[in-house]
Amino acid sequence: MPALKAFIVEDSPVILENLIATLEELAEVEVVGTVGDEAGAVRWLKQSPAGADLLIVDVFLRSGSGLGVLAAARELGTAGELVVLTNYATDEMRRRCLSLGAARVFDKSHELDDLITHCAQLAQGRPAGGASTASLAS
């Protein structure tokens, strides 16, 4: 089975390096590109609308915002699943991300293993539901 193709929007070089290594080793994910700002992510989305099965987006970026990336992806009809990986995974931020088309929101501090599991399940072609969205307050 071919690897799940992922594009990552993350501005921290340390987090990015560790995330790529972990995803490629543990979740059958091939990272096809990375960028650290909203403008670069939107440019990539416009040039490669079907270029990835999964987009992993941080909320706070070097310039711009992951929320802008999510909005652009929705507007462009991006085919890949959108997930958010952030240090700011409050209930309100989760709601905002989900309303902009994110399938899941993961907290960098506490839900990194959940992200890896989610990616592994996607790579194996299984539904990848879970608690990150179900735990939102109404």
Image: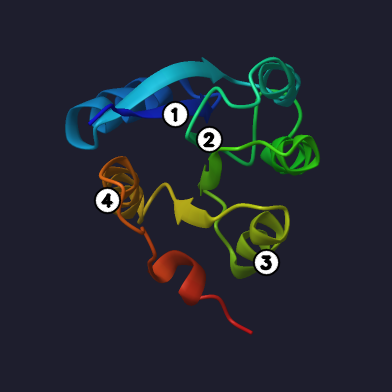
Q: Amino acid at mark 3?
A: Glu
Disc 2 + disc 3, Cβ < 8 Å: no
Residue position marked by numbered label 4 in the rendering: 117
Badge number at residue 6? 1
Front residue of 123/100: it is: 123
Q: Alpha-carbon neighbours of circle 4 within 10 Å: few (<14), some, or many (≥20)?
A: some
The disc, 2 or 4, on the residue closer to the chain's N-terminal end is: 2
Q: Amino acid at mark 1?
A: Ala
Q: Quadrant of the C terminus?
A: bottom right
Of circles 4 and 3, the one toward us is 4
The disc, 2 or 3, on the residue closer to the chain's N-terminal end is: 2
The disc, 4 or 1, on the residue closer to the chain's N-terminal end is: 1
The disc, 4 or 3, on the residue closer to the chain's N-terminal end is: 3
Disc 4 + disc 3, Cβ < 8 Å: no
Residue position marked by numbered label 3 in the rendering: 92
Left or right: 54 as drawn, with respect to 3:
right
Q: Amino acid at mark 2?
A: Leu
Q: Amino acid at mark 4?
A: Thr
The disc, 1 or 3, on the residue closer to the chain's N-terminal end is: 1
Seen in the picture, residue 47 relative to 138 is either above or below; the reply is: above
Badge number at residue 55? 2
Label 1 to label 2, Cα distance in Å?
Answer: 6 Å
Front residue of 4/60: it is: 4
Q: Position of residue 27 (x, y in %)?
A: 24, 37
Residue at the extreme right of the image, as rendered: 75
